Image: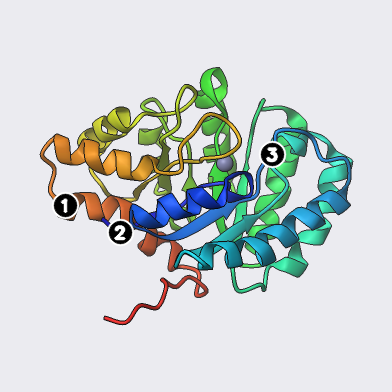
Amino acid sequence: MEYIEMHTHMVSRTTDDYYQMALTGCVAITEPAFWAGFDRTSADGFDTYFQQLTEYEPKRAAKYGIQYYTWLCLNPKEGEDRNLAQEVLWRIPKYLDHPTVLGIGEIGLNRVTRNELKTFEEHVALAIQHNQLILIHTPHLEDKYKGTAIIVDTLLSDARIDPQRVLIDHAEEHTIGMNLEKGFWTGITLYPQTKASPQRAADMIEMYGPERICVNSASDWGPSTPVAIPQFVMEMRRRGHSDDLIRKIVYENPIEFLSQSPKFQLPRRIR
Ligand SMILES: [Zn+2]
């Protein structure tokens, strides 16, 4: 089944992973900027990273017929350093007109500190100012509920925010209802240990229905898999769900959300 991977970090994956994704039906990828597993020491490091995301990765993906897009930001973990954050925020606008940049992300909170919140608010302001879509990272494990609630409240307190243009990612059983109820899009991340499994994702779809929900792998440098979406497709089929329903979640929903950016297109195929 064709699918769109809304959240993956291909900079830390191999070319074989692109190959496996293409073989399993992946037609497009969106890659948020993230924490590389170690702290970058300067704003110049981010410039290099943004160049890798906007110039190098689209070409690597294209070799496998996969359309590639990215989101830019300074990630929540590094957002704790306010001086670095301001320097990086100042550099982001020059990349926003690039044809493969869809918006600002993945922004949010990690340890839910005052500094992180300030950096988050500045990213949101930047997105509004440049009319960008927003992709949100929510904290892991014990910080998940509190962090998601603060993110939702912060976004809703700004009248300029249209929840339809924001996807709140890494939702779990105790946060998905809050995201959907307030009108946001939400993502369920299929990631071993710290996030959801294909089985838990299928349970959530059965409880909440398919509207405004996407699934993704968030595959990166940690234990994770770039073909988590095909595993979710298998689990949904095993439970007897129709291909129409599954296709809505893994293909049509991402198109509906991402097409709010005029830049988003699927690969051209001759039919
Ligand atoms: Zn991520």
Residue under circle 1? 243
Type of the residue with mark 3:
Trp
- Sequence-earlier tag: 3 or 2: 2
Residue lying at 32% horizontally and 82% vertically, measured from the top left: 270
Q: How many marks?
A: 3
| Image-based side of 191 in relation to 116, left or right | left
Quarter holding the N terminus is bottom left
Color style of the picture: rainbow
Name the quarter where the C terminus is drawn.
bottom left
Determine whether the residue tagged by mark 1 lies in a helix, strand or loop: helix
Q: Which residue is mark 2?
A: 2
Residue 132 visible in this rendered orientation of the protein: no
Q: Give the amino acid at mark 1.
A: Asp
Q: Nearer the viewer, residue 269 or 49?
A: 269
Say above or below: 49 vs 200: below
Q: Please tell me whether residue 267 is drawn above or below residue 168 in the rendered image.
A: below
Task: Provide the residue designation for mark 3.
Answer: 35
Residue 6 image position (x, y, % from top left):
46, 52
Disc 2: CA contacts within 10 A as few (<14), some (14-19) or many (>=20): some
Q: Residue at x 61, y 56 (%)?
A: 71
Residue closest to the eye, 186 or 251: 251
Disc 3 from disc 2: Cα separation: 29 Å
Q: Is residue 48 left or right of residue 105?
A: right
Q: Earlier in the sequence, mark 1 or mark 2?
A: 2
Callout 2: helix, strand or loop? loop
| Alpha-carbon span between mark 1 and mark 3 | 35 Å
Mark 3 vs ligand 1: CB under 8 Å? no
Of tags 1 and 2, the one toward the viewer is: 2
Q: Nearer the viewer, residue 135 or 251?
A: 251
